[in-house]
Amino acid sequence: MLNKSHFATLIQEQAAKYGDTRVMSYRDYDLDKWVEISWNTFNATQRAVSRALLHAGVAVQERVAVFSQNKPECLFIDFGAYAIRAITVPFFATSSAAQVAYMIQDAEIRYVFVGEQQQYDTTFSVVSTCPTLEKIIIFDPKVQRNAGDHISVYLSDYLAKHQTASAFDAEIEARQRNASDKDIANILYTSGTTGQSKGVILTHEMYQEALRVNNLAVPMYEGYTAINFLPFAHVFERAFSYWCLAEGMHLAVNLRPLDIQKSLTEVHPHCMCSVPRFWEKVYQGVLQKMETGSFVQRTLIRKALATGSKCWLEYTSKCKPIPFWLKLKYSFYDKTIIQLLRKTLGLENAHIFPTAGAAVSPEVETFVHAAGLNMLVGYGLTESTATVSCDVIGKPFTKGSVGRLVSDLEIKFGENNEILLRGKTITPGYYNKPKETAEAIDAEGWFHTGDAGYIKDGELYLTERIKDLFKTSNGKYIAPQMIESKLVLDRYNTQAVVVADRRKFVSALIVPDYALLRQYAEEHELGCTTHEELCQHPEILKMIKQHIDQLQQDLAPYEMVKRFTLLPQPFTMETGELTNTLKIKRRVVYEKYADLIDKMYEE
């Protein structure tokens, strides 16, 4: 049952109810095993955090930063801060020194909690440019401190004298009593695909309302296991994890994103929120299995998925009973093929899998449901505390939609069909940015999302990102994200950026799967060894073109990719082309590859 208490007291109340039952687990890489944390331990540790912060003089609504990859400690700091009405400001673990310095300065942060060596090194490197910064508190005891460092301390030492001392308990309880839903809980800095990032204000009222309306749309159960995949600094994962804690669920904290597939097979979760790219990779893996398997294997997998697709598309998604003959047929394939697929993925306990953050291709959505996995497609923003709309359990939902609007959230459509929102889950604005706040939220309180869409039969559909809409020199409008989502469906393509704005036709920069290209080159004796050779060989380019032509058969002629370039290096956060949430920085890509882009438009 959902605990609707203020976050200032949530963990304390859940510990009184669940005691030594596990609330979290994480993989200890030194022991190579999952370690469990009980509700009582969580409560005791967050209490120690509250005492330590009060001892440090942290005031009501003062900002405290958490700069770490996902770790249980992130949640200890969050709820320890909430108990004394402080604000936490999560930084993405891959943030650059410039980004960290900007956020510390903008939010006037005195205390930064860091995870591992990378976050410590980055934070220490900006100490001289951040006059407010007083203390760095380090989670990982293996971090090597700089020889000239006199302001850092390890978390275990920082909390040691506050584990049992009760000198500050009266003040904690006083602040808990005075905690208000209007208090700011977090400032989440947006990814910043263009310009400087903005700190989105998230209040406790926004979180409470988000938990309430999501709970109405989707059933969750105490004792279930949810595994995190996205970073806690991402509003989607953050709000979902808080929901799990309020439901009395077990949260498996996956420390390293690259280990998620291994973690799934070890944890066997009921739930996980993710982005479409995760499911695209699963889909590509199954397609590859179908291509490389025996004739019998290929036939069985194809028929199993076709049967599952029919069940979902024609009956389950429409809340109609599946005919007996089809149910019998699906049962056969489920027992022989589909259950094995789910078990291989570690998803045999699958309950719900909320997915948002980008467009979900119809092929991937159908595949996931055909495999018996309850993907719930949704739409949301940091400014809306994640969920604006989602597929609702027990109600019909349509392939291609982003579900039904959550309860009590108002919507209307403005110029160019822009989605405008108003309600309790919508941010009051951007921290220290009145001009940007006024531009985003009009005088009547409507938040302008920048996304265009429409509602049909109660479901929301997105058409394009207005700010990303391209216009070719021929006057045709192009939605690049839709084309890019098609391109990366092919197993040979891992990343794609479309070029079209003020150009004569659509072109694309594509990052291929180098391992698969090398395998293709070996099988066809092409003699390629380096990435550059693979990306330029005429036979490989011909093969990729054939795949692209197949993918874009249903596009209008003016939307089709006419030319493309394979890149020998991927887009990464380190090289500046990706944000912390793995969104493409188009301006950076266009500037970096300007010569290659111009070459594609040479006569």
Image: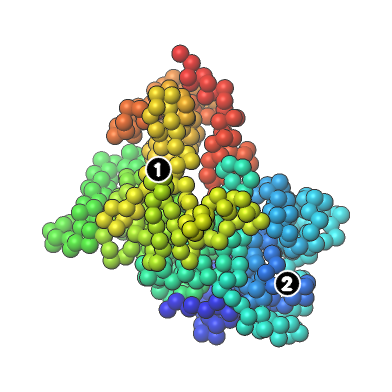
Name the residue: 44% across, 71% down.
Answer: 212
Which of these two is toward me, 164 or 362?
A: 362
For residue 558, above or below residue 61? above
Name the residue: 47% across, 69% down.
Answer: 209
Name the residue: 48% across, 64% down.
Answer: 425
Q: Taking the image as drawn, is residue 376 in sight?
A: no
Residue type, numbered disc 2: Ala
**Which residue is label 1 attached to?**
416
Residue type, numbered disc 1: Asn
- Give neighbour class at mark 2: few <14, some 14-19, many 20+ (Cα, 10 Å): few
Name the residue: 49% across, 59% down.
Answer: 445
For residue 377, above or below residue 592? below
Q: Position of residue 511 (x, y in %)?
A: 50, 34
Q: Taking the image as drawn, is residue 183 in sight?
A: yes
Mark nearer the N terminus (1 vs 2): 2
Q: Label 1 vs label 2: CA separation? A: 45 Å
Q: Which mark is residue 59?
A: 2
Quarter of the N terminus within the rendering: bottom left
